[in-house]
Amino acid sequence: MEGYFDIIRVILVLIGIVAAMIFLYRYGSKYKLHLKPRANDYGLKKMATVPLGYKKFVSVLEIKDYVLVLGVGEKEMSLLAKWKKEESTT
């Protein structure tokens, strides 16, 4: 019987921790805690990353008006393709 109370106590503590994390995430910006990620000034956005092997991958980045395809290895990085982003006409 005492084991059940211990399990219930652990579950209640975990629920309290999750509730505190949600509270801090929602109200952190209101109280200037800066918990949410900010937009960067460089206009850099990672679109996709495809792993090719151990510490090797291809990544597609969007930087302001350009799209870059980078090949990244353990000790090197190379530009595979680069093109100017088209303006959407909607």
Image (cartoon, rainbow, N blue to C red):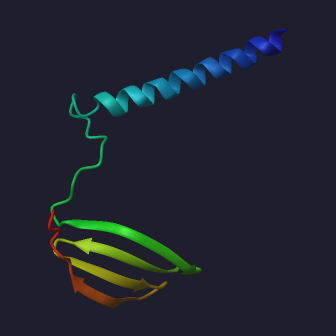
Up the image or down, 37 lies above or below 54; here it is: above
Which quadrant of the figure contains the C terminus? bottom left
- Of the pair 79 and 35, the residue shown nearer to us: 79
Residue drawn at 59 percent across, 25 percent down: 14
Residue 83, percent across and down?
Answer: 23, 85
Residue 29, percent across and down?
Answer: 24, 34
Residue drawn at 17 percent across, 71 percent down: 64
- Of the pair 2 and 77, the residue shown nearer to us: 77
Quarter residue 43 falls in? bottom left
Report whether 10 appears left or right of 33: right
Report whether 52 appears left or right of 47: right
The residue at the far right in this view is 1
Q: Give the total of numbered labels.
A: 0
Report whether 61 appears left or right of 5: left
Up the image or down, 17 lies above or below 57; here it is: above
Residue drawn at 24 percent across, 67 percent down: 44
Up the image or down, 62 lies above or below 84; here it is: above
Report whether 35 appears left or right of 7: left
Residue 20, percent across and down?
Answer: 44, 25
The residue at the far front in this view is 90
Residue drawn at 14 percent across, 68 percent down: 89
